[in-house]
Image (cartoon, rainbow, N blue to C red):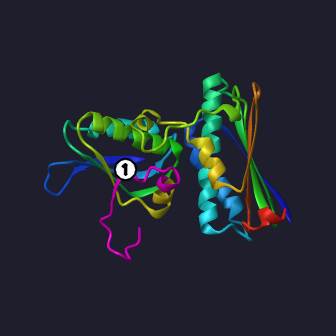
Amino acid sequence: MESRVDRTPNGSEPVLVVRGDLDLASAPALRAAIIGAVEPGRDLTIDLSAVDLVDSTGIGCLIGALRRVRQAGGDVALRDPRPRVLDLLELCGLDSVFTIVSTREVGDRP
Amino acid sequence: MNRLVELAFPSRTDYLAVARLVVVAAASIEPALGEERLDNLRLAVSEACTNAIEAQQASGATQEEILVRCQIDDERIAVEVLDQGGGFDPDTVPELPEPDRPERLDHESGLGLTLIRLLTDETQIVSSSQGTLIRIIMYREPSAQMAS
């Protein structure tokens, strides 16, 4: 897994861009990246557009992100999850817990 | 047509992707599972292997290998994941709070077995203090489950 922190276009909010599989192997790095991206009073966007697989450990990391960011006074948005990742969130009943945002145009390939 | 594909891997997290690849490749041999069911199998295998790795690490059995066995025939693929960890009682796994409850955010784990059961056609778990066997079955045609 690779990650980097960008900023939203207006520069005010952090965006954690993640690439790779989110599983037990990548969980320590993902947790560290999330902790590093949390800023007091600011929302955090996690860009999942380049994430092919999220399993329950990855879901756990995202839940941990939500808890940490809310404790810091912000909220978490998941940006452009692929359909199978979105399906998993729905299966777990967590699609309504996270804010899901899409920047893709209709017809774009994930 | 009956085929057997086996993989034994060290109790290390970086082998998770290998286990997923092997099982998906075995299940992709014609007649392959459909794409969505293949994705479900891949995720279920990831969960079962995660459970195995964590069980062996928790019990100190890190030198033991984890065995993944795929039995493939015209009707179905059966995947067994066998570890030598300390075992658990699959009937007493705690339930997670409902997703809309604030305390749900205090639980970062505990979804794995639920997902395996939701994603596969059949799941069997046999566990003792000597280890755990998780057996997953996916039928090539979902309707075959009802007919068998």
**Residue at x-position 70% and y-position 30%:** B89
Residue A106 forms part of the magenta stretch: yes
Q: Seen from this angle, which residue lies furthest bottom?
A: A107
At mark 1, the secondary structure is loop
Left or right placement of residue B49 versus residue A57 in this view: right
**Residue at x-position 70% and y-position 25%:** B86
For disc 1, the chain is A
Q: Position of residue B96 (x, y in %)?
A: 53, 37
Quadrant of the drawing holding the N terminus of chain B: bottom right
The amino acid type, in three-letter code, at marker 1 is Phe
Q: Would you say the magenta stretch is mainly helix, strand or loop? A: loop
Which picture quadrant has residue A9? bottom left
- Please say if A12 is above or below B52: below
**Circle 1 crowding by C-alpha within 10 Å: few under 14, some 14–19, many from 20:** some
Q: Seen from this angle, which residue lies furthest top?
A: B60
> Who is closer to the viewer here, B90 or B52?
B90
Which picture quadrant has residue B72? bottom right
Quadrant of the drawing holding the C terminus of chain B: bottom right
Residue B143 forms part of the magenta stretch: no
Left or right placement of residue B15 versus residue B79 in this view: left
Q: Position of residue A31 (x, y in %)?
A: 39, 37
Q: Where is residue B23 in the image (x, y as percent from the top left)?
A: 68, 54
Left or right placement of residue B75 versus residue B16 in this view: right
Left or right placement of residue A93 versus residue B7 in this view: left
Magenta residue span: A89-110
**Which residue is label 1 attached to?**
A98
